[in-house]
Image (cartoon, rainbow, N blue to C red):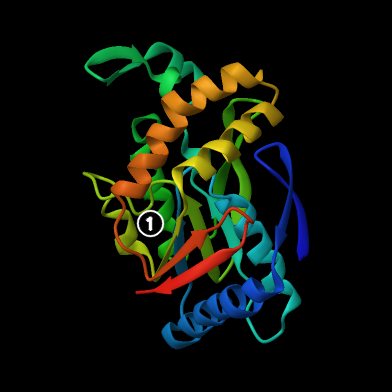
């Protein structure tokens, strides 16, 4: 196993990946992106979509490090869509409808309507136009995005997010900007266990964490699993944190 220690959204994460996955999935993926960049002669954008709890942010961090360690592939730059969460003060003062009832948006933070979709689209358009631009990052301790936290300058950019392949109005157009798409699937129970552990790690009591995860995170997870478009590459996350692969 290969260990990867990283801070994601303000939380320390200790991940492990199998050598088989590196050899048979991750390096071939990086080779595919390298070939796309060389054949198209311009910046390329890949999108990785997955339900909450599938480890997509951590995986992208690992892939970025891996790309820098292997000379046969080009270095990639990884970014996420979480920085396009609407600000906490907005979510506290606006409502949405869930199960026929009006509720504060903050109660379902992380659902599609709590993101600034138009702002995300504009950011993606800048990237695909080859523009070097600032990109926001979400900090779970601040409960808000930090604007222009990173500068997008890479020639191969890999963007991750829950809803990048969501097949619903407004969202389904996003993948049209992608040169390559990836989706991670996992069993619902596995996702729930990982989400509860993550919320506890960020300081929430276990009973509160489980209640929030079932009401909010798992609703979003099922939305991703059941209503996402097919991807060029699909990965299946197993309980031992290894992956299986299916190519379109």
Q: Which residue corresponds to mark 1?
A: 125
The answer to whether residue 56 shows anywhere in this view is yes
Q: How many marks?
A: 1
Q: Secondary structure at mark 1?
A: helix
For this rendering, which residue is in front, 103 or 235? Answer: 235
- Seen at 48% across and 71% down, the residue is 245
Which percent across, then down, holds residue 3?
Answer: 78, 60
- Seen at 58% across and 17% down, the residue is 208
For this rendering, which residue is in front, 126 or 145? Answer: 145
Which percent across, then down, holds residue 145?
Answer: 56, 33
Q: Residue 9, located in which quarter of the rendered image? A: top right
* Left or right placement of residue 76 versus residue 68 in this view: left
- Seen at 53% across and 49% down, the residue is 54
Which percent across, then down, holds residue 67?
Answer: 67, 73
Considering only vertical position in the picture, is 21 above or below 118?
Answer: below
Q: Residue 17, located in which quarter of the rendered image? A: bottom right
For this rendering, which residue is in front, 3 or 141? Answer: 3
Q: Residue 47, located in which quarter of the rendered image? A: bottom left
- Seen at 61% across and 78% down, the residue is 27
Quadrant in which the N terminus appears = bottom right
The answer to whether residue 115 shows anywhere in this view is no
């Amino acid at each position: 196993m290969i260990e990867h220690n990283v801070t994601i959204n303000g939380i320390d994460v200790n991940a492990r990946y199998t050598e088989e996955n590196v050899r048979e999935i991750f390096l071939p993926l990086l080779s595919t992106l390298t070939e796309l960049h060389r054949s198209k002669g311009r910046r390329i954008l890949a999108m990785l979509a997955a339900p909450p709890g599938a480890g997509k942010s951590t995986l992208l961090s690992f892939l970025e490090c891996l790309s820098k360690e292997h000379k046969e592939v080009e270095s990639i730059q990884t970014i996420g869509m979480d920085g396009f969460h609407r600000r906490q003060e907005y979510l506290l003062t606006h409502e949405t409808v869930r199960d026929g009832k009006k509720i504060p948006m903050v109660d379902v933070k992380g659902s599609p309507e709590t993101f600034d979709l138009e702002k995300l689209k504009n950011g993606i358009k800048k990237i695909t136009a080859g523009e070097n631009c600032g990109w926001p990052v979400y900090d779970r301790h601040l409960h808000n995005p930090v604007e222009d936290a990173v500068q997008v300058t890479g020639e191969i950019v890999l963007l991750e997010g829950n809803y990048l392949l969501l097949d619903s109005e407004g969202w389904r157009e996003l993948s049209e900007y992608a040169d390559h798409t990836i989706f991670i699937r996992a069993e619902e129970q596995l996702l729930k266990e990982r989400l509860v552990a993550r919320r506890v790690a960020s300081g929430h009591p276990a009973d509160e964490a489980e209640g929030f995860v079932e009401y909010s995170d798992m609703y979003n997870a099922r939305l991703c699993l059941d209503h996402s478009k097919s991807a060029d590459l699909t990965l299946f996350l197993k309980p031992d944190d290894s992956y299986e692969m299916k190519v379109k």
